[in-house]
Amino acid sequence: MNNRIDRSAAYLMIIIITLFFISGAYAQSQNKGEQNYQISNDSIVAQQIMKSFSKNLFYGIYDWVTVDSKNGIVTLKGWVHLPWLITQLQKAAEKVPGVKSIDNKIEKTFGPGRIGVQVAHVIYHSDPLYYGQANTVNPPVHIIVNVKTVILEGRVDSERLKDKVTNLVFSLTDVVDVKNELKVMSKGK
């Protein structure tokens, strides 16, 4: 009889220990699920903010703003050529559901000036690939003039096109320095 009680107690202990480990693993998976949901929610918030920016008639080829969202705390970084656009974009971001607060690090550039207009003309009028895309909702190349440096931001289809834009700017304008920050889109996007 004593042997039977010892075995039952051992089985009971094994069951309790197993349940303990299963419940811990379940709790960890729940936390990971919440993290994944938060990451997904943050990316949706960032996408919605960028969508609201694209609806702004004054946000165009001489502006570039990125959005980062972590737990509803949104950071806006980049440049605009119109000073009041900084406030307009922040107000648009504040209206997006899920935004708790905004850290606005958008800077004002010196405007496109002669150099920016020259660069835009070379990219959007000299190259048939980009012809007419300057005034689209999301133009592929954004031109930021920061003192004597031209910063190129946006997305292109290949490394070759990224290099081509830089070569066009250097060979057909008075630009002294180009910082090419263009991203190459992957085939699936």
Image (cartoon, rainbow, N blue to C red):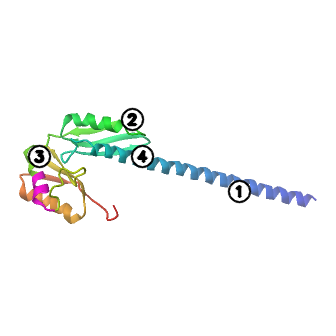
Q: Front-most of 131 and 26? A: 131
Q: Which mark is residue 141?
A: none
16 left or right of 174 in image: right
Asked if disc 1 and disc 2 are in contact, CB closer than 8 Å, the reply is no
- Helix, strand or loop at label 3? It is loop
**Residue 59 spot, x, y in % from top left:** 22, 43
Residue on which disc 2 sits? 101
Amino acid under disc 1: Thr
Residue on which disc 1 sits? 18
**Residue 170 spot, x, y in % from top left:** 10, 57
The boundaries of the magenta stretch are 120-128
Q: Residues within 10 Å of mark 1 (few under 14, many from 20)?
A: few
Amino acid under disc 2: Ser
Name the front one of labels 4 and 3: 4
Say which label, 2 or 3, has the lower sequence index.
2
Residue located at (15% from left, 53% from top): 178
- Helix, strand or loop at label 2? It is strand
171 left or right of 59 in image: left
Q: Residues within 10 Å of mark 4 (few under 14, many from 20)?
A: many
- Helix, strand or loop at label 1? It is helix
Amino acid under disc 3: Lys
Residue located at (55% from left, 48% from top): 31
**Residue 180 spot, x, y in % from top left:** 20, 55
Residue on which disc 4 sits? 42
